[in-house]
Image (cartoon, rainbow, N blue to C red):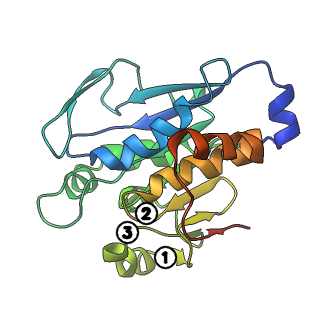
Amino acid sequence: MPSRSERSRTARPLRVHTVLYDGAEEQDFAGHVEVFGIVGEERLVQSFVTVDGPRRVTTSAGMEIVCRDAWSPRSADVVIVPGGGYGDGSGIQREIRRGTLPRALAAARRDGLLLGAVCTGTMLLAAAGLTAGRRCTTHHIALDDLRAQGGHVVGGRVVDDGDLVTCGGVTSGIDLGIWLLERFFGPDTALFAEEVLEYERRGIVNGT
């Protein structure tokens, strides 16, 4: 993972892919997307992607989001998976049962790629075998299942385990976004984002 000084010397912007799927929760991806948009495309470029390639995705509230970019984790520095409810009929459950996205996430893992998840999005990483033995968190309703699948659940609104960064429920995606700005661009950029959003980070970041 690039240090702050390394990132500041890199001409290429940070490339962030947010993975969408039918039933994804709006706030689970809106939080970090809004935060990242503050720094400008000369420093950070965002894409919405789906494992099925470019298509329209219908969110949990019925919004349609156009994902124009192909699934290409090798062209990303950060891949973030939002949650999509939990339990019977949820978007998360459908994707775990279908298996396509968990398999794609497992295959995406490589040196230099940071995988992140918001809320129950961590359970998709768990289904991919990416949280076993790793420090992580998710929405409180899924914590027991995350433990049962081998995740080392620890306290914290955001849990940073190096190339795996997860956060708790729904609005904690804002905190994840601000924390990643701090990791890549330094505390001044993170503080600037807080000022623009008129938002103060809650809880703690449990780091390595």
User: Could one spot residue 1 in this view of the protein?
Assistant: no
Give the side of residue 79 with respect to residue 184, left or right.
left
Q: How crowded is mark 3: few (under 14 residues within 10 Å), some or many (20 or more)?
A: many
Kindly report which numbered mark, 1 or 3, lies closer to the viewer in this rendering: 3
Residue appearing at x 51%, y 27% in the figure: 46
Which is more toward the observer, 108 or 63? 63
Across and down, in percent, residue 74 comes to 58, 29
Which is more toward the observer, 90 or 184? 184
Q: Please tell me whether residue 194 is drawn above or below residue 12 in the rendered image.
A: below
Question: Of helix, strand and loop, which one carries label 3?
Answer: loop
Which is more toward the observer, 120 or 37? 37
The tag on residue 150 is 1
Q: Residues within 10 Å of mark 1 (few under 14, many from 20)?
A: some
**In the image, what residue type sits under mark 3?**
His
Give the side of residue 198 with respect to residue 67, left or right.
right
Q: Residues within 10 Å of mark 2 (few under 14, many from 20)?
A: many
- Name the image quarter holding the C terminus: bottom right
User: Could one spot residue 8 in this view of the protein?
Assistant: yes
Q: Earlier in the sequence, mark 1 or mark 3?
A: 3
Question: Do tag 1 and tag 2 residues touch (Cβ < 8 Å)?
Answer: yes
Residue appearing at x 23%, y 49% in the figure: 98
Question: Do tag 1 and tag 3 residues touch (Cβ < 8 Å)?
Answer: no
Q: Mark 2 points at which residue?
A: 126
Question: Of helix, strand and loop, which one carries label 2?
Answer: helix
Across and down, in percent, residue 148 comes to 40, 81
Question: Do tag 3 and tag 2 residues touch (Cβ < 8 Å)?
Answer: no
Kindly report which numbered mark, 3 or 2, lies closer to the viewer in this rendering: 3
Q: Which of marks 1 and 2 is nearer the N terminus?
A: 2
Q: Name the residue under label 3.
A: 139
**In the image, what residue type sits under mark 2?**
Ala
The image quadrant that residue 188 belongs to is top right
